[in-house]
Image (tube, rainbow, N blue to C red):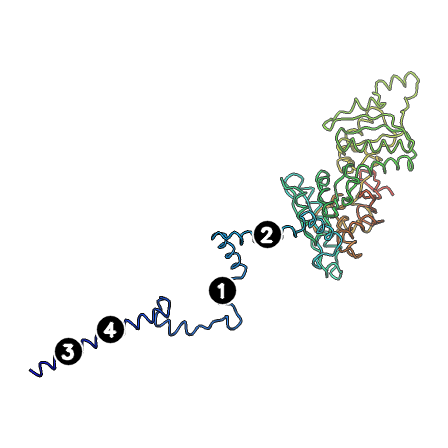
Amino acid sequence: MQKTEDRSQKSEVRSRMAEVCLLLSVFCLLFILGCTGGKQIHPLKSLHEESSIPDKSIQGQPPLEKKHPEVKRQETEVGSRESGDKSQEQKVKSEDIKTKNQEPKAEDQELKKNLRTASHEPRTEKLKIGCILTLSGEGASIGQRVLEGVQLAFNSLIPPSSPLEKGGVDLIIRDSGGDISSANLLEGLAKDEDAIAVIGPIFSKSVINSVKTADKYKLPVFSPTASSRNISGISPYIFRNSLTNQMQGEALADYAVNRLNLKRFAILYQRDPYGIELKNVFEEKIKSLEGEIIFSEPFDPDQNDFEPQIMTIGGIRDSNLKKILDAGKPKPKLKYDAIFISGTAEKAGLILPELAYYNISGIPILGGNGLNSPDLVRIGGKYAEGIIFADGFFPASEMPSIREFVERYKLFYNKEPDILAAQSYDAAGIILSLIKKGAKNREDIKNGLLNLKDYNGVSGTTAIQPSGDSQKTLFFLTVKNGKIVEIK
């Protein structure tokens, strides 16, 4: 019986001890949860990971999860607005207004930048020369010849030992072919402070459209080809190294009056922009030299028979001339001393034999650079002998500088250069010569161009006038023994 009671007591003790252990376990679990804020912690992580990763903020570095202060500030401001904190939102708005009031106007910033770009040195030691040319689409053949002249200048006029080679001058080429605006390309170059000049554009209309951008950024624009009379003096930053109708018309009139002692003229001119403008300049200059225009007869560009014009200026048929001579009368004298043809070589080649056919001969015949073509001799034949015309370039000249240029051009491009390549070669050469003399920014280039005198170029000795136009010595040419030669 006693044993049975002892067993019963032992069993009760064990039961109570189990309850106590259970209570202790619950108490310990609650204590642990209270210390960790309810976060579940894996025992291995607690021992090995978290205890082994140092708090890098203690070592002077931001904690791994800490965000950029600006990000935190913005998040705080957004949080404040979302929570309806009106005072914080008003503070942000006030700071924004204050910042805006302190910012300079965009126009002022642009003006200051333009002034700095024009008169200060580039940001780097490497200068840039822009080149805007039509290299695709309509007019691409012209653009290509201009590009060839410019590239030859960069290859020939910058020797390895030159300061230009050491300092660096980059040629930046832009194609204005198709629907691409030359003005937009120019503005893109103008915003680059290292660009101190631009060669091009090649067409007069594009040059005129470049005036606003050139003036805004004070960027010298130097066209080697634009010839329109409307460009002269259009902007203090627009220049050109091209043979203009104004230049050659005046030079031909001066040559006729002061060198050949001619006073009275009959003019046959092609009814197109070139023919009309050259004729007008020639007429004005002749009158200013106290000469006289007796006839001025137009013809159409597609015309091949010139009898009406020739008869008007004194032509006579053989049958009528025979009657006059048979009657014992002398051949009627012409009322003028010379004929000026303002047109193309093809049309002049047709006119010359027809003049002889209608018994107009034995007087000087002059023309512009439109006559400087093999077509003149090919079509005109023996009747082209002795005709006088002017041009801005003559590849067969015996001048050493021209001979060297022609040889180099043929070596590089396997063809003979024309006036467009020559003028472009000189335009690039002029810019490079100014840099050699110390030009470092846009204002230096502009002033250097305005002060350019007697530049010995392959397209003639060149000076730049205040209008931005070039003044050149021209080549006077004639046909001798079936060849175009220079008049010495």
Q: Position of residue 148 (x, y in %)?
A: 70, 48
Whether label 4 touches label 2, CB < 8 Å: no
Which badge, 2 or 1, is on the more N-terminal residue?
1
What is the C-alpha distance between the residues marked 2 and 3? 80 Å
Q: Report the disc number at residue 22.
A: 4
Which badge, 2 or 3, is on the more N-terminal residue?
3
Q: Quadrant of residue 234?
A: top right
Q: Report the disc number at residue 94.
A: 2
Query: Type of residue at label 1?
Result: Lys
- Label 1 residue SS: loop
Frontmost residue, 211 versus 166: 211
Whether label 2 touches label 1, CB < 8 Å: no
Q: Position of residue 308 (x, y in %)?
A: 79, 22
Up the image or down, 342 lies above or below 427; here it is: above
- Label 4 residue SS: helix
Q: How many residues crowd mark 4 within 10 Å: few (<14), some (14–19), many (20+)?
A: few
Q: How many residues crowd mark 3 within 10 Å: few (<14), some (14–19), many (20+)?
A: few
Q: Which residue is mark 1?
A: 66
Which badge, 3 or 1, is on the more N-terminal residue?
3
